[in-house]
């Protein structure tokens, strides 16, 4: 398909990619298809909400892509931040374990 050829050309043109396994092309093709399908289905929902159902406009697609970028391709939380949260949480001692625990039956 033309899409597979375009992805193969992009891989070949990337200076950091020295060699790629054949499965990489299939994975990228599947990812691009899934991403485009989901973005367009979101754009259709936005178009229906805006009142022009059945006709997806550029603004709807732009909004769908922007909404996906925020949670799908978000960066990782810095390790130092997570470590500071863990240190803060672990500084509070746990409550003592009672002498009697479990369900007390009559």
Image: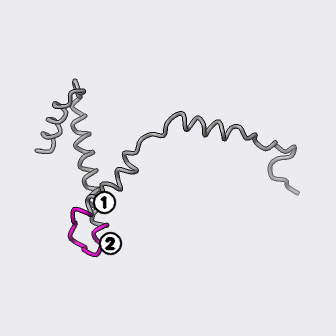
Name the residue located 24 percent from the left edge and 74 percent from the top edge.
52
Q: Quadrant of the N terminus?
A: top left
Q: Which comes sooner in the sequence, label 2 or label 1? A: 2
User: Rounded to the nearest whole Å, what is the CA distance between mark 2 and mark 1?
Assistant: 12 Å
Quarter assignment of residue 63? bottom left
Residue 56, given in percent of the width and then of the height, sits at 22, 66
Report the colour scheme.
Answer: one colour
Q: Which range of residues does the magenta coloring cover?
A: 46-59
Residue 23 part of the magenta segment: no
Name the residue located 28 percent from the left edge and 50 percent from the top edge.
35
Please tell me which residue lies in front, 53 or 69: 69
Residue 66, given in percent of the width and then of the height, sits at 32, 54
| Element assignment for label 2 | helix
**62, above or below 11, in the image:** below
Side (left or right) of 95 relative to 81: right
* Residue holding disc 1: 63
Side (left or right) of 100 relative to 10: right
Residue 28, given in percent of the width and then of the height, sits at 25, 40
* Residue holding disc 2: 49
């Amino acid at each position: 398909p033309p899409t597979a050829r375009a992805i193969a050309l992009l891989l070949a043109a990337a200076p950091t990619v020295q060699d790629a396994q054949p499965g990489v092309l299939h994975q990228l093709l599947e990812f691009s298809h899934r991403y485009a399908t989901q973005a367009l289905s979101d754009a259709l929902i936005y178009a229906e909400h805006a009142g022009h159902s059945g006709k997806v406009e550029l603004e709807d697609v732009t909004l769908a892509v922007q909404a996906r970028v925020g949670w799908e391709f978000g960066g990782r939380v810095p390790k130092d931040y997570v470590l500071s949260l863990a240190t803060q949480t672990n500084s509070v001692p746990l409550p003592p374990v009672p002498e009697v625990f479990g369900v007390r039956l009559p």
